């Protein structure tokens, strides 16, 4: 399923989003390690780390929307050039255009949850 979505969503955009997923997973792992390590500097470094996680998630979502907009412009140009297009073809194109923003949104939600938990733990 991931490889199908990767190819349908566009290799360039999905590579960037999967790279951001990898970065977020590494940062989340570092944050969890700092939660388990009871060092005094944990609060300040954990705050900076959680802000980085939130930034990566936000950027993934915004990049997904940007990539969708680029794809929609190209699709609308193709529809204009072709003239008459079936509704099924348009619906399929809309489904494909939502893949990148969906993966970015899920990453944003995951990063927001970890940011919120770290904020509550450091109070």
Image (cartoon, rainbow, N blue to C red):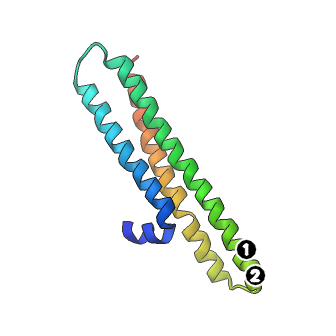
- Extreme left residue here? 37
Of residues 26 and 101, the one drawn nearer to the viewer in this rendering = 26
Of residues 24 and 123, the one drawn nearer to the viewer in this rendering = 24
What residue is drawn where x is 64% and y is 62%?
Answer: 70
**Can you give x and y, in whole percent of width and height, for residue 108 in the image?**
48, 44
Residue located beneath label 2 in the image: 81
**Can you give x and y, in whole percent of width and height, for residue 80 in the image?**
77, 78
Q: How many marks?
A: 2
* Residue 97 in the image: above or below residue 57: below
Tag 1 near tag 2, CB within 8 Å: yes
> Would you identify the image quadrant in which residue 86 lies?
bottom right
The answer to whether one can see residue 70 in this image is yes
What residue is drawn where x is 25% and y is 30%?
Answer: 33
* Residue 39 in the image: above or below residue 91: above
Residue located beneath label 1 in the image: 77
**Can you give x and y, in whole percent of width and height, for residue 61 in the image?**
54, 49
Task: Give neighbour class at mark 1: few <14, some 14-19, many 20+ (Cα, 10 Å).
Answer: few
Task: Give neighbour class at mark 2: few <14, some 14-19, many 20+ (Cα, 10 Å).
Answer: few
**Can you give x and y, in whole percent of width and height, for residue 100 in the image?**
52, 60
């Amino acid at each position: 399923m991931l490889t199908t979505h990767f190819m349908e969503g566009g290799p360039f955009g999905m590579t960037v989003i999967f790279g951001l997923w990898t970065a977020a997973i590494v940062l989340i792992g570092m944050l969890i390690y700092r939660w388990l390590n009871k060092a005094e500097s944990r609060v300040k470094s954990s705050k900076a780390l959680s802000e980085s996680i939130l930034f990566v998630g936000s950027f993934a979502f915004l990049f997904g929307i940007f990539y969708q907009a680029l794809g929609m412009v190209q699709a609308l140009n193709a529809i204009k050039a072709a003239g008459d297009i079936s509704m099924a073809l348009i619906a399929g194109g809309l489904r494909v255009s939502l893949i990148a923003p969906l993966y970015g949104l899920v990453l944003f939600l995951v990063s927001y949850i970890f940011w919120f938990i770290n904020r509550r733990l450091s109070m």
